[in-house]
Amino acid sequence: MIFGIMGMLLIAAACRFAMQRKQLSSGRNIGRFPLHREDEGNYVFNDLVTITGQKKWCRLLLSFKLQGTYQIDMTPRYFFKPAALVMGTPFILTISDAAGRVLYREEDTLARFLAWLGGRGGSRGTFFSEQGRGIHEGRITLLEFLPGHSGLYRISLNMQSRVEGKAPGASSYCELLEAELTVKEDVIPLSKTVKYPHKRVHI
């Protein structure tokens, strides 16, 4: 009985993985763009893309590499103080039509995507302190959107390259080392049965 239930769960998980893999590989690329680093250090993409399919789902894929470190003083003086741990760098994403009308705007951080990426790093500490370093690297679905018509759309993505957090007895930072944006059209939307942290919108 137990082995039968476990077998059914494994089959369901394998089917869901295969379905998500098919969804992620669907569609065709209409642009792949490295994000340019501006003088103030932010990563920026701001360009026009031509969407040929009418009322077909599109996907924004973001490939990036993020590095973070933290240090916490765990002595009794700071033990009950809030720690300053930053997770993910902020970004602002906007999609506009050819006339310049903003159809979608999102302001958030990459924090909610980090659990979906592979990472490496480690920590070390003593009874009174702890410090660690880690790197997250991979590709995420940043957004899925359904345009009302084909034509030109301007996609603008501004990503803060470094963010720091400081508090009494604690400090941390996250730094975006590299990033690339891919735009795909005519994709199969990711299934809602998999709680992927991106948003799906009609514009």
Image: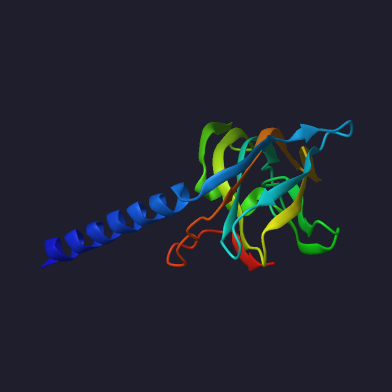
Quarter placement of the C terminus: bottom right
Image quadrant in which you'd find residue 199:
bottom right
Q: In this view, does 2 lie to the left or right of 98?
A: left
Q: Determine if residue 78 is in view.
A: no
Q: As rendered, which of 98 and 62 lies closer to the eye?
A: 98
Q: In this view, does 57 lie to the left or right of 101?
A: left
Q: As rendered, which of 87 and 195 lies closer to the eye?
A: 195
User: Which residue, as the protein is rendered here, is positioned at the far right?
Assistant: 39
Q: As rendered, which of 193 and 146 lies closer to the eye?
A: 146
Residue 50 percent location from the top left of the image: 69, 49
Q: As rendered, which of 195 and 111 lies closer to the eye?
A: 195
Residue 110 percent location from the top left of the image: 66, 49
Q: Determine if residue 86 is in view.
A: yes
Image quadrant in which you'd find residue 105:
bottom right
Residue 92 percent location from the top left of the image: 78, 52
Quarter placement of the N terminus: bottom left
Please give the name of the residue rendered at 56% of the width and 60% of the height, measured from the top-left corner: 57
Residue 156 percent location from the top left of the image: 78, 49
Q: In this view, does 117 lie to the left or right of 83?
A: left
How many dots with numbers? 0
Please give the name of the residue rendered at 67% of the width and 47% of the height, measured from the top-left corner: 87
User: Which residue, as the protein is rendered here, is positioned at the far left?
Assistant: 1
Please give the name of the residue rendered at 74% of the width and 53% of the height, measured from the top-left corner: 152
Q: What's the coloring here?
A: rainbow
Relative to residue 48, is residue 179 depicted above or below? Answer: above
